[in-house]
Image (tube, grey):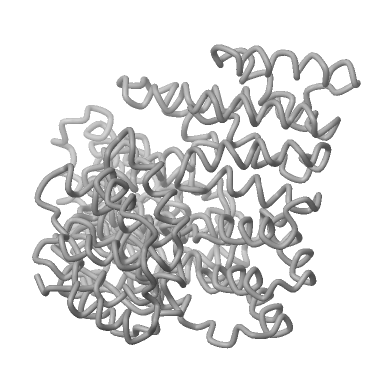
């Protein structure tokens, strides 16, 4: 480990940042860092020192040690203090990066997030080496680290920060990470014109910042949350601590600040703004729903001050009263009673949603308990099961049970194309481990997809409402699994094309061709945004069977009868095999190849199939 103190002190002295420390009390605070009982108070005290804390923090960086649980806790607390100091600690950035470069450093996400918080003030673009050399192979760690590296780059984009007009434009761009810097700069400028800008943006809880969905893990979007809520909240409080518009600022501090004591203080300070709490009802409901009883109690008290608007959440408050414990539950019960006295009633939609979620949870649990056919059918016809099924796929990936993949394919046909395609893309990355974002990626391992992966991927790529003409085009798709699905859909709805003179001939010819020719083995499937992987998989037999099944109710030309019989007899649908044999008895001279094939089928183990073949032979021989 490079001796940091010597270099650090020289830099501090040169920049005239060092002034005599009034006492050595900070030594005790440094000792308390990482202690379960004492660390938070020590961290707050060090943050309160401002720039004067840089030298003692640098001394601790020189002692960087992650070899034990206790020392790792100390390092995490140290990084948290530096992050809370923000711009005041920018000089420490290069030293923090050196700590992250230690061999097998287990704290890369924390190091990178701290470096991000010091940008753009540190002005350090050389983060690539840390990413390549120190990033952990553990996926949870890798994902958190990549999110931090994305923050570094995003925060560095905001360079001009000396004008409210410039900052307003940047805030309107609403870019992940960048908007944090905007909030910090607005607080530093002290321009009251920023109050309303920050207030309005914090009230907009629906709009996600741009680029917040760029991080993918195995094709799945990993939603990223930046620190705008905390930093914009702090900025509002700094600009106008007593202004009613600051209520949403206190709420965000109570929701996001890393120190629990600060979260409680924020709620108590917010109480001084009285009815302004109505601005922060969603945030207060989130706090009230968490496990921290003291914070939940403070949040419920504030909800009681917010007025009738809280009635929108009456169902959730009833749930807190019923399922909670202690003082928080009693306050929730009293709040619910007051809301009803004001004329509030539970929203029918909320009650229905609550009942639906209970039902979905019941069906989800049933999947783990060997569900019978009736339960599986109920799941397959319930659109609300889609996120629960896809979550099982996300977690289980290639090891997800085939039954779940079958359900995903069926429920997916009840969903929008956008929903299907977003999950379909993940099948191309179902083996190995893949992380990607706009400026970085990481891939490890690989294995071949199984038939159920290919089949589910194909079914999610076909619109179940496709017209016969559209399905005919899909019979020529480069992906043989897509061809199979198209044939299956034509087979399941023969009436849609067999009775239409406009569709019949084209569909009939396309199915005849699909049932009697070979199909491609090489094809491409999506493996991420705008990426494909070449696959090599034989599927000719299955496509031919599906196409032959679709022709079971039709007449077929004598020249193709043998190939068609060879395909259809492999079908698991016994009734369709029988129907095909009965319908494919041709007029004209007896065809010895057909007779030979029927003679072979007459020995089939399925009694009805063998019987149909014998009857067909008798008819042919009678001609």
Q: Quadrant of residue 561?
A: bottom left
Check the image and report above or below for 472 versus 329: below
Position of residue 263 measured from the top left corner of the image (x, y, whole percent): 55, 41
Q: Nearer the viewer, residue 581 or 132?
A: 132
Q: Residue at x 11, y 61 (%)?
A: 104
For the question of whether residue 68 can be seen, the reply is yes
Q: Nearer the viewer, residue 210 or 455?
A: 210
Q: Residue at x 58, y 43 (%)?
A: 254
Position of residue 301 measured from the top left corner of the image (x, y, whole percent): 70, 26
Quarter the N terminus occupies: bottom left
Q: Quadrant of residue 449?
A: bottom left
Check the image and report above or below for 237 versus 262: below
Position of residue 345 measured from the top left corner of the image (x, y, whole percent): 83, 21
Q: Nearer the viewer, residue 217 or 155?
A: 155
**How many marks do you count on the picture?**
0
Q: Quadrant of residue 417?
A: bottom right
From the viewer's perspective, is 365 left or right of 281?
Answer: left
Q: Residue at x 69, y 85 (%)?
A: 163
From the viewer's perspective, is 356 left or right of 270?
Answer: left
For the question of whether residue 428 can be seen, the reply is no
């Amino acid at each position: 480990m490079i001796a940091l103190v010597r270099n650090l002190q020289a830099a501090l002295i040169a920049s005239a940042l060092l002034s005599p420390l009034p006492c050595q009390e900070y030594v005790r605070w440094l000792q308390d860092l990482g202690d379960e009982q004492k660390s938070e108070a020590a961290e707050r005290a060090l943050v309160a020192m401002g720039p004067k804390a840089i030298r003692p923090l640098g001394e601790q960086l020189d002692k960087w040690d992650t070899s034990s649980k206790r020392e790792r806790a100390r390092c995490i607390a140290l990084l948290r203090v530096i992050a809370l100091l923000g711009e005041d600690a920018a000089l420490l950035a290069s030293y923090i990066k050196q700590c992250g470069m230690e061999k097998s450093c287990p704290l890369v996400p924390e190091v990178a997030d701290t470096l991000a918080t010091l940008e753009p003030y540190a002005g350090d673009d050389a983060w690539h080496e840390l990413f390549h050399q120190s990033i952990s192979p553990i996926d949870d760690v890798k994902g958190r680290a990549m999110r931090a590296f994305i923050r570094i780059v995003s925060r560095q984009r905001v360079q001009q920060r000396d004008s409210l007009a410039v900052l307003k434009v940047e805030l309107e761009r609403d870019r992940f990470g960048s908007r944090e810097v905007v909030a910090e700069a607005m607080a530093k400028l002290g321009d009251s014109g920023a109050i309303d800008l920050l207030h309005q943006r914090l009230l907009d809880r629906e709009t996600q910042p741009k680029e917040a969905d760029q991080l993918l893990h195995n094709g799945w979007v990993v939603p990223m949350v930046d620190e705008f809520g905390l930093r914009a909240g702090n900025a509002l409080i700094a600009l106008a601590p007593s202004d009613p518009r600051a209520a949403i600022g206190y709420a965000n501090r109570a929701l996001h600040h890393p120190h629990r004591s600060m979260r409680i203080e924020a709620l108590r300070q917010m109480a001084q703004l009285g009815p302004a709490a109505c601005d922060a009802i969603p945030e207060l409901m989130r706090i009230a729903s968490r496990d921290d009883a003291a914070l939940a109690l403070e949040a419920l008290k504030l909800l009681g001050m917010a007025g009738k608007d809280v009635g929108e959440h009456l169902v959730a408050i009833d749930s807190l009263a019923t399922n909670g414990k202690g003082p928080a539950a009693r306050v929730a019960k009293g709040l619910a009673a007051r809301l009803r006295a004001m004329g509030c009633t539970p929203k029918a939609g909320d009650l229905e949603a609550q009942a639906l979620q209970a039902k979905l949870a019941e069906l989800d649990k049933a999947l783990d308990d060997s569900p019978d056919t009736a339960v599986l059918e109920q799941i397959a016809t319930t659109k609300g099961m889609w996120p629960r099924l896809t979550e099982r796929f996300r977690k289980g990936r290639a090891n997800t049970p085939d039954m779940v993949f079958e359900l995903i394919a069926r429920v997916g046909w009840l969903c929008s194309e956008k929903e299907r395609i977003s999950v379909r893309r993940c099948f191309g990355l179902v083996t190995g481990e893949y992380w990607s974002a706009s400026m970085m990626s990481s891939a490890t391992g690989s294995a071949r997809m199984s038939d159920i992966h290919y089949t589910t991927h194909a079914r999610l790529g076909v619109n179940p409402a496709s017209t016969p003409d559209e399905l005919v085009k899909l019979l020529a798709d480069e992906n043989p699994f897509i061809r199979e699905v198209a044939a299956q859909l034509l087979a399941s709805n023969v009436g849609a094309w067999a009775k239409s003179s406009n569709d019949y001939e084209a569909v009939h010819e396309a199915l005849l061709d699909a049932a009697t020719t070979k199909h491609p083995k090489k094809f491409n499937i999506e493996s991420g945004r705008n990426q494909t992987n070449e696959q090599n998989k034989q599927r000719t037999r299955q496509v031919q069977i599906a196409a032959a099944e679709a022709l079971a109710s039709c007449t077929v030309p004598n020249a193709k009868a043998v190939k068609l019989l060879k395909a259809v007899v492999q079908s698991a649908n016994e009734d369709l095999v029988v129907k095909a044999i009965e319908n494919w008895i041709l007029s004209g001279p007896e065809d010895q190849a057909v007779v030979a094939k029927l003679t072979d089928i007459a020995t089939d183990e399925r009694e009805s199939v063998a019987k149909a073949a014998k009857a067909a032979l008798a008819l042919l021989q009678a001609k």
